[in-house]
């Protein structure tokens, strides 16, 4: 009766009327342990309070008129409708979106024959999913889970076990869970990339979405006229100090280097070049961001004779949805006591000096033993 009343009033009144149909909530006193086990055997997932509150607010703020009956909660009733296909996301591709307790997920097969950029990112001869590509995957997953929102930030990005293609294609599950509101119009999702074969989480981040991207803060440029010339040609640096193949070579010029960082010019990339059949536009351009990480390696090789790999990013902030033309990258680096951790900051700017994105507090594990990754040792095919 409630549903029929909502449908009738929604058709007659100018405002929206909706009947919300809840599955069982996971709260003390409502569902006993035995009842919870019975629900679980039937494929009915309890609704976590924070998830339910977030879903209610989301429905009230962004639900559409005409949708008078809304079912909230994961259970066998979802099997009656086909799962939607993912479209328009370069790295998620044409995978299928499915519901899981407290969120949604997509399973994607990473294959160097399709994901061409993997051929050009080899560690000890094996294609490895770059941290920057994992950031793009997690950003795409969050955008897919919350249509109509912009990915404004990635917080607490962690490189855990990574994903290594040591014996052919590898399936990963990208999962977005635990949506919760933050200040203003923001929503935070916990997003992970899990290696299906091992069950291990390779990468993790908190993704902040907003209805519109924030305005860029004012940027104060460093004294670039005091920089020293980089001690070798860019071509030689790629051949001898880095392990990145042609698709990932986004550095087009190095303005200079000093004891605190580097300044260089990077070029945005295209999904169509990096992924066979790739569609849509990048959210986090993985080639551009990885090229910033390459500058970190060049600085460390030159100043410390060591190679750093990204381990943690406290915060990545994004201020524009489109990257057109060359990008100026300003890298600031600081070595922690002991010399094994390198802390870096990145500013990505357009030709007018306006901030496009920034990376705050990236930690890199720094080691001379990792110098073996460079040059011919990167892979058997010379890339």
Image (tube, rainbow, N blue to C red):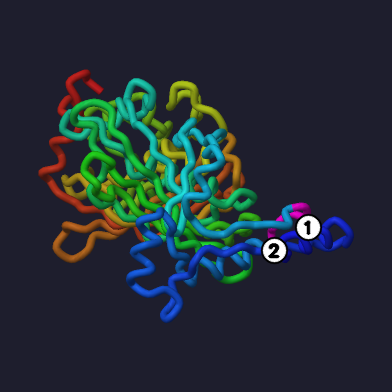
Query: From the viewer's perspective, is residue 170 above or below residue 334?
Result: above
Checking the image for residue 80, the label placed there is: none
Question: Residue reaching furthest top?
Answer: 381
Residue, x 23% and y 44% (percent of image)?
Answer: 302
Question: Residue reaching furthest left?
Answer: 369
Query: From the viewer's perspective, is residue 112 above or below residue 357?
Result: above
Disc 1 element = helix
Question: What range is drawn magenta here?
Answer: 62-66
Residue at the spot of label 1: 7
Disc 2 element = strand
Checking the image for residue 19, the label placed there is: 2
**Predominant secondary structure, magenta span:** loop
Q: In which quarter of the image is residue 286?
A: top left
Q: In which quarter of the image is residue 128?
A: top left
Q: Is residue 171 visible?
A: yes
**Place of residue 102 in the rendered image (x, y in percent of width and height, measured from the top left):** 45, 59
Q: Find out whether residue 64 is within the magenta segment.
A: yes
Query: How far apart, in angstroms, are the residues tagged by discs 1 and 2?
Result: 8 Å
Disc with the residue nearer the chain's start (1 vs 2)? 1
**Place of residue 145 in the rendered image (x, y in percent of width and height, measured from the top left):** 53, 50
Residue, x 52% and y 50% (percent of image)?
Answer: 77
């Amino acid at each position: 009766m409630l549903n029929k009343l909502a449908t009738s009033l929604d058709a007659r009144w100018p405002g929206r009327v909706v009947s919300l149909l809840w599955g069982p909530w996971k709260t003390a006193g409502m569902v006993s342990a035995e009842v919870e086990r019975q629900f679980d055997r039937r494929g009915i997932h309890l609704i976590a309070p924070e998830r339910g509150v977030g879903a209610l607010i989301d429905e009230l703020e962004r639900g559409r008129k005409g949708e008078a009956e809304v079912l909230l909660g994961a259970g066998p009733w979802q099997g009656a409708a086909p799962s939607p296909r993912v479209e328009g996301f370069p790295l998620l591709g044409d995978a299928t979106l499915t519901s899981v307790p407290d969120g949604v997920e997509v399973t994607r097969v990473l294959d160097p024959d399709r994901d061409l950029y993997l051929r050009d990112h080899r560690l000890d001869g094996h294609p490895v999913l770059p941290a920057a590509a994992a950031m793009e995957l997690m950003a795409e997953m969050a955008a897919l889970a919350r249509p109509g929102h912009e990915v404004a930030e990635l917080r607490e990005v962690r490189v855990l076990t990574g994903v290594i293609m040591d014996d052919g294609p590898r399936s990963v599950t990208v999962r977005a869970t635990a949506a919760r509101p933050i200040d203003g119009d923001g929503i935070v999702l916990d997003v992970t990339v899990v290696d299906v074969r091992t069950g291990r989480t390779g990468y993790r981040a908190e993704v902040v979405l907003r209805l519109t991207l924030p305005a860029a803060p004012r940027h104060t440029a460093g004294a670039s006229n005091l920089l020293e010339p980089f001690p070798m040609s860019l071509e030689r640096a790629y051949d001898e100090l880095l392990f990145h193949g042609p698709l990932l070579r986004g550095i087009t010029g190095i303005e200079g280097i000093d004891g605190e960082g580097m300044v260089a010019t990077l070029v945005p990339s295209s999904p169509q070049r990096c992924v066979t059949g790739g569609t849509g536009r990048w959210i986090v351009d993985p080639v551009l961001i990885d090229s910033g990480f390459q500058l970190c390696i060049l600085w460390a090789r030159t100043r410390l004779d060591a190679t750093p790999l990204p381990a943690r990013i406290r915060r990545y902030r994004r201020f524009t949805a489109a990257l057109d033309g060359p990008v100026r990258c300003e890298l600031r680096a600081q070595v922690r006591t002991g010399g094994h951790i390198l802390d870096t900051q990145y500013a990505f700017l357009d030709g007018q000096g306006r901030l496009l994105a920034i990376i705050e507090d990236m930690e890199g594990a720094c080691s001379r033993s990792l110098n073996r990754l460079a040059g011919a040792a990167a892979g058997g095919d010379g890339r």
